[in-house]
Image: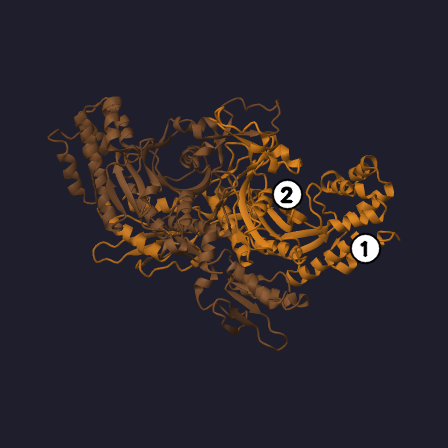
Chain colours: A orange, B brown
């Protein structure tokens, strides 16, 4: 079986229940390897992995209001009338719809035990009670990293967090990712400077955030007619949103000149300083990873400074694959405030695109490198011993299910993409192993043999050279 | 910070929501390493990892009736009246309460694509809507392996599945596990042979299954008074339940002699043959792993042959930590029947015991091996470069959050259990690295240095020599 055919299998996300994707084994190989690579990078940078429970009290999930429509509530099928609580909203439980809300709660729950700054990664499924007809995922993996401080959190984490995520994403077999950054202080400070009143700043930001969805003209109309700023102010805001670049000096000059003589507010200057410091470190540590893009607003979230969105080369239509930003208060328990900065990948959506578009191939759907043939059932123990000897040296092995004709046993391996079939020798005869791709067969000893190519030890994921041809496989 | 103190942290399962355990970072290190070790063993044996969606239609979850009380139902918080379905049980969704029901559904959904026999492992959380006051877990990890055939499945998998699970469990830093096996054909065939009618066989099995809970006398009473078998038959059934051993010939002789001259039924002889073949292979491949124990019945499940339960040395009070068996029909779609054999660990319960009882220690709660100190904020880039050089060679590194006094930076490492602190040299001075456990400090180059002990590269989990002393840490 060719890698192409496995790629076709990897592509298949099942949907016997709309919005709840499920992978065939080849697809799960890809998902698991993606998760392993991301995790490895985060751990190299000192992030602790945590998992939070899947459920939170409804009061926790709806604290910020806007996401309440997406919550799945739980009830016990056999919850009897004697068991209190489910009618009481304070005791009602729902599935988490992101990993930020549970992480903030975890920080508060454990504020006395955790060491700050606390760097954590979290890779878990989340659920959103979307309307079925929208065709969105209702269950999917999110991959989050955050750094959270106690009282304060140094600014250098604002650049470290996206650089680490970029390093992790660059280790995946996917097209290049660019992280676009802005800073809400720049946008809001700029709006202040052109005379927009403070109580309209967030609303302007939210409308500008719709640029990619509804276009410049519609945003301009909404800014003037709904938000109530002047046409000149709307044009200035839209002008700011066109600015991109990696040179902080040029960017600063363009922003200030767009003020058209107006005095820059203290907030604008603070934002430009933060953005400049981020861009300088990014250019030095990972050139090309990060670009300033002043239209990034994350309008629906509660960020207070740096914000991120990320785009995959050739797949900009997918929208941001990885987003985040800084919160002055990720969490607070009244006495202490915990600022944080984080970034999150919607992994299932990313995987669905790269597999659905045939961008990657997987060499096989099973971990097995060697199928040990069985000569006859009386000698199954001989084959078991060969397999155990291979496994002891880290070579994944399976033993044929029945002592069928060797041709049938080879087809068993071939159908699964297992590259090698091992034939135990009878009597004084030596064992031999056959590479069923090339047909080459050599004498071998299970205590010493290894595949010539280490890549044959585990399924390999490859970025397809030509997706359009792979798509036809 | 000593390993003991981290062990105390690892032990702490949080319960701000009853039944939904959450680990501190040290506990999650243990959980993740357990999962990694189990997965690695399963893959060496050629098992494919799959994940199924967390939800199933209620009709699927309640098909077998008895578990319906444990189901959590989902509803959309904002599900409007125009959106059909939630009152219709066929469209109602619930969280899966085990991994067998979803796996059976996955096999049917993909019967045309999967290759059989299909070997899969599955490590996911499951949910049970238990009554809160029972103090049971309502969310926990299960770890399942199953082999499923199309139409038939060779008997040798009945011994391979528990041996693989035993190999996986033996790789964990926990007390020894012994897998106890029986075969329902032996029990039911024996009951037949002593004259119990066929329509009472399953009921006898279910009552005998309560032996550990209610004791011999209560079981005898229930067998006679409720099930309605004779006192002599009840005594014979209880006598069978006392038989254990690893020698199949002795076991066969004891079972047959307990018939007291009655003719063994064909079912009993078939069961003894299956059990004998399992014990012979087990004794050869993993002596001591498996023992026959004829009281094992798995009364509430739908097994049809071999059944397994497993016990941890010194922790028999915990009950079975890993159970399973063979189904003649794991799944069926009307036209095809899929027999299966599998075994499942209740991982969260196992972890909760080994951590709660102080059986294991973890050397640190963070992946970080080296904290790179920062001399002053102007030179943070130097420290970043050291950390990147270490990471490139697989050494997890973090950089101090601020350029505090070195004493404070060392305490930062110490509190987290990070073993090494790296000091970048100023000017022409060489860098140096300090093992903060021993105090030893040596000159070092980030391009070549590695810790003397490879164990320092990642958190290590150790089986505590003396749990009672660790418990006091």
What residue sits 42% from the left and 45% below the top?
A: B352
Q: Which residue is mark 2?
A: A318
B446 to the left or right of A443: right
- Whether residue B417 is visible here, answered yes or no, is yes
Chain letter behind tag 1: A
What residue sits 80% from the left and 41% below the top?
A: A199
* Distance from the alpha carbon under mark 2 to that under mark 1: 29 Å
A89 to the left or right of B323: right
Q: From the image, state whether disc 2 or disc 1 is nearer to you.
A: 1
What residue sits 29% from the left and 54% below the top?
A: A386
What residue sits 14% from the left and 35% below the top?
A: B256
Looking at the picture, how far across and down is residue B397, in whole percent? Answer: 55, 62
- Determine the image quadrant of residue A271: bottom right
Looking at the picture, how far across and down is residue B159, in whole percent? Answer: 28, 43
Looking at the picture, how far across and down is residue A408, in whole percent? Answer: 32, 43
Q: Which mark is residue A254?
A: 1
- Determine the image quadrant of residue B452: bottom left
Element on which disc 1 rests:
helix
Above or below: residue A360 compared with residue B447? above
Above or below: residue B81 compared with residue A208? above
Looking at the picture, how far across and down is residue B306, in whole percent? Answer: 28, 37
Give the mark nearer the N terminus: 2 vs 1. Answer: 1
């Amino acid at each position: 079986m060719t890698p192409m055919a496995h790629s076709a299998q990897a592509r298949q996300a099942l949907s016997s229940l709309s919005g709840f994707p499920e992978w065939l084994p080849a697809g799960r190989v890809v998902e698991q390897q993606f998760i392993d690579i991301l995790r490895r990078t985060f751990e190299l940078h000192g992030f602790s992995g945590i998992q939070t429970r899947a459920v939170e009290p409804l009061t926790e999930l709806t604290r910020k209001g806007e996401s309440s429509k997406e919550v799945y509530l739980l009830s016990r099928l056999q919850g009897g009338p004697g068991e209190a609580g489910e009618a009481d909203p304070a005791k009602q439980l729902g599935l988490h719809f992101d990993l930020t809300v549970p992480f903030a709660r975890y920080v508060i729950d454990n504020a006395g035990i955790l060491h700050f700054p606390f760097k954590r990664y979290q890779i878990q499924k989340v659920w959103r009670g979307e309307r079925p007809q929208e065709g969105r995922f209702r269950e999917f993996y999110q991959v989050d990293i955050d750094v959270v401080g106690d009282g304060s959190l140094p600014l250098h984490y604002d650049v470290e967090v996206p650089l680490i995520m970029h390093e992790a994403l660059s280790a995946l077999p996917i097209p290049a990712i660019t992280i676009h950054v802005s800073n809400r202080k720049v946008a809001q400070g700029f709006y202040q400077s052109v005379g927009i009143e403070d109580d309209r700043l967030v609303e302007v930001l939210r409308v500008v955030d719709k640029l990619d969805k509804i276009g410049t003209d519609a945003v301009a109309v909404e800014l003037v007619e709904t938000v109530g700023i002047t046409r000149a102010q709307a044009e200035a805001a839209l002008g700011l949103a066109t600015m991109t670049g990696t040179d902080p000096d040029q960017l600063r000059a363009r922003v200030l000149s767009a003020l058209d003589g107006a005095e820059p507010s203290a907030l604008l200057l603070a934002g430009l300083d933060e953005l400049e410091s981020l861009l300088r470190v990014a250019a030095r540590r990972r050139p090309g990873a990060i670009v300033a893009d002043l239209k990034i607003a994350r309008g629906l979230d509660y960020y207070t400074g740096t914000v991120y969105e990320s785009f995959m080369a050739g797949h900009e239509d997918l929208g941001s694959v990885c987003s985040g930003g800084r919160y002055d208060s990720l969490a607070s328990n009244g006495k202490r405030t915990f600022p944080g900065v984080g970034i999150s990948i919607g992994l299932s959506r990313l995987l669905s695109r790269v597999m659905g578009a045939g961008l990657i191939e997987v060499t096989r759907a099973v971990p097995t490198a060697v199928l040990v043939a069985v000569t006859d059932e009386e000698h199954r123990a001989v084959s078991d011993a060969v397999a155990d000897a291979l496994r002891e040296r880290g070579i994944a092995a399976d033993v044929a299910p029945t002592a069928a004709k060797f041709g049938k046993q080879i087809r068993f391996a071939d159908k699964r993409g297992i590259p090698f079939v091992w034939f135990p020798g009878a009597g004084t005869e030596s064992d031999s192993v056959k590479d069923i791709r090339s047909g080459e067969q050599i004498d071998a000893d299970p205590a010493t043999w290894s595949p010539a190519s280490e890549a044959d030890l585990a399924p390999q994921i490859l970025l397809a050279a030509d997706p359009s041809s792979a798509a036809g496989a």
